């Protein structure tokens, strides 16, 4: 550290430099407290090149060039891809000692850099396609793969992505459920639609995994799309987050069907086996479930969460599991965690589950703090949950985004 002309460099010494951007101030001798290297003249006088150990934070992480750098311990992290990419400036091309270069970093950061490499390669492929087809980014906004495989890892900050448009989606590895309802005539409408839909599927069978559930296996998605999700069928309220998500999800499911995926679904109804009030559908009876509504919401019913326990395993056929699958099932059922991810290893990787409940309008609990109260709706509430096996997305379901171009 210090003035380059006054610094004494020895080829047998290790120079320790601490780069502190906050201490970038003038020293007593009028020099800046930054890293200083020997000039060409000083290097020629040495029998060996000097060794520097340099420690630093923001300056080093954001791309300060270190001449002759061969080893880096990188401990920084970021939840934004562009910020992390700015930090990836460790090495240039140095002929003769490329194999000496080493980088140590946490596993989580390594995974992010590996993902950045994939994003970069796909973006290059997009530009190559432009070249081959004579297109221009001015005409077609380039598609950029998003980072849903790592939770909470964004391409860039929200204020820099105001013109980003989500285009390709992936809903695998997640679950979606209705938790908000309005107290109106659509409650009775949903009961009638659901019961007609279930009766059209034929007889259900007792679930092997959940004693209070019944299952219809291998139902063509086209039937669900027409008789349950179709126009004038099950009514999803505008206050529900699924109101905007379901149309996109259904379009994605159609594309998956065209690729030969998710052609058949399993359908199940689950309930409370201790309930005195029953829901009769065709050849079965299942107990209605109890939920309470949040008192904070005045204009609609918000139950917070719908699915409970291991109900997402209702369609697992234990008798058909292999030894390894049975072991995974027991661990999943015991821990009650990673259920969505583990479904792929339990024989239903390509079969989403539509799980249905009937919420008793007369039940619910009054909490002491007054945050919850009874449902007290005019009719029972039909709630559903969709479960698709796979790794969780951890946020947006967009697989790629493009840029909104000005007209």
Image (spheres, helix red, strand yellow):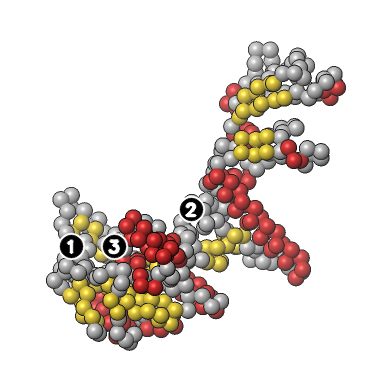
Residue 135 placement, left or right of 199: right
The percent coordinates of residue 208 (x first, y second) are 31, 72
Write down the residue under mark 2. Answer: 151
Observer-nearest residue: 73 or 119?
A: 73
Instruction: Label 3: state its secondary structure.
Output: loop
Residue 296 in view: yes
Write down the residue under mark 1. Answer: 364
Observer-nearest residue: 357 or 293?
A: 357
Q: In this picture, is 149 found above or below 53?
A: below
Crowd rating for badge 1 (residues with CA inside 10 Å; few <14, some 14–19, many 20+): some
Residue 178 occupies which quadrant of the picture? bottom left
Is mark 2 in CB contact (under 8 Å) with mark 3?
no
Write down the residue under mark 3. Answer: 308
Residue 344 placement, left or right of 371: right
Q: Residue at x 76, y 40 (%)?
A: 98
From the image, state whether disc 2 or disc 3 is nearer to you. 3
Q: Residue at x 45, y 65 (%)?
A: 345
The percent coordinates of residue 71 (x first, y second) are 68, 34
Q: CA distance from mark 1 to mark 3?
A: 15 Å
Residue 42 placement, left or right of 387: right
Q: Residue at x 61, y 35 (%)?
A: 73
Residue 182 occupies which quadrant of the picture? bottom left
Q: CA distance from mark 2 to mark 3?
A: 24 Å
Residue 53 placement, left or right of 394: right
Q: Which mark is residue 355?
A: none
Quadrant containing the C terminus is: bottom right
């Amino acid at each position: 550290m210090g003035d380059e002309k006054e610094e004494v460099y020895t080829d047998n010494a290790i120079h320790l430099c601490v780069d502190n951007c906050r201490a970038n101030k003038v020293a007593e001798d009028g020099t800046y407290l930054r890293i200083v290297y020997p000039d060409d003249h000083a290097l020629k006088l040495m029998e060996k090149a000097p060794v520097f150990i340099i420690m630093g934070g923001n300056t080093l992480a954001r791309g300060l060039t270190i001449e002759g750098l061969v080893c880096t311990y990188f401990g920084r992290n970021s939840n934004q891809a562009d910020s992390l990419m700015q930090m990836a400036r460790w090495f240039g091309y140095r002929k003769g000692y490329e194999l000496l270069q080493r980088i140590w970093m946490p596993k989580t950061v390594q995974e992010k850099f590996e993902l950045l490499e994939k994003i970069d390669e796909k973006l290059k492929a997009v530009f190559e396609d432009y070249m081959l087809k004579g297109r221009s980014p001015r005409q077609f906004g380039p598609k950029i793969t998003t980072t849903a495989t790592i939770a909470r890892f964004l391409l860039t900050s929200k204020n820099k992505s105001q013109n980003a448009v989500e285009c390709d989606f992936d809903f695998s590895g997640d679950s979606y459920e209705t938790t908000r309802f309005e107290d109106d005539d659509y409650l009775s409408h949903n009961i009638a639609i659901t019961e007609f839909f279930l009766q059209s599927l034929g007889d259900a069978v007792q679930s092997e995994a959940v004693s209070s559930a019944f299952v219809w296996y291998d139902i063509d998605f086209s039937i669900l799309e027409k008789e349950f999700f179709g126009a004038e069928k099950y009514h999803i309220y505008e206050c529900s987050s699924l109101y905007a998500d379901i149309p996109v999800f259904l379009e994605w499911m159609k594309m998956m069907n065209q690729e030969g995926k998710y052609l058949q679904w399993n359908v199940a109804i689950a309930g409370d086996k201790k309930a005195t009030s029953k829901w009769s559908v065709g050849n079965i009876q299942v107990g209605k479930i109890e939920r309470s509504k949040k008192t904070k919401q005045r204009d609609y019913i918000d139950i917070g969460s719908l699915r409970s326990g291991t109900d997402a395993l209702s369609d697992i056929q234990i008798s058909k599991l292999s030894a390894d699958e049975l072991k995974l099932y027991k661990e999943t059922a015991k821990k009650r965690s990673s259920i969505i991810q583990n479904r792929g290893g339990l024989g239903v990787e390509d079969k989403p589950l539509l799980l249905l409940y009937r919420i008793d309008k007369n039940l619910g609990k009054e909490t002491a703090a007054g945050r919850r109260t009874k449902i007290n709706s005019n009719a029972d509430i039909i709630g559903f949950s969709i479960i698709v096996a796979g790794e969780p997305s951890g946020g947006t379901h967009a697989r790629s985004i493009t840029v909104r171009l000005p007209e």
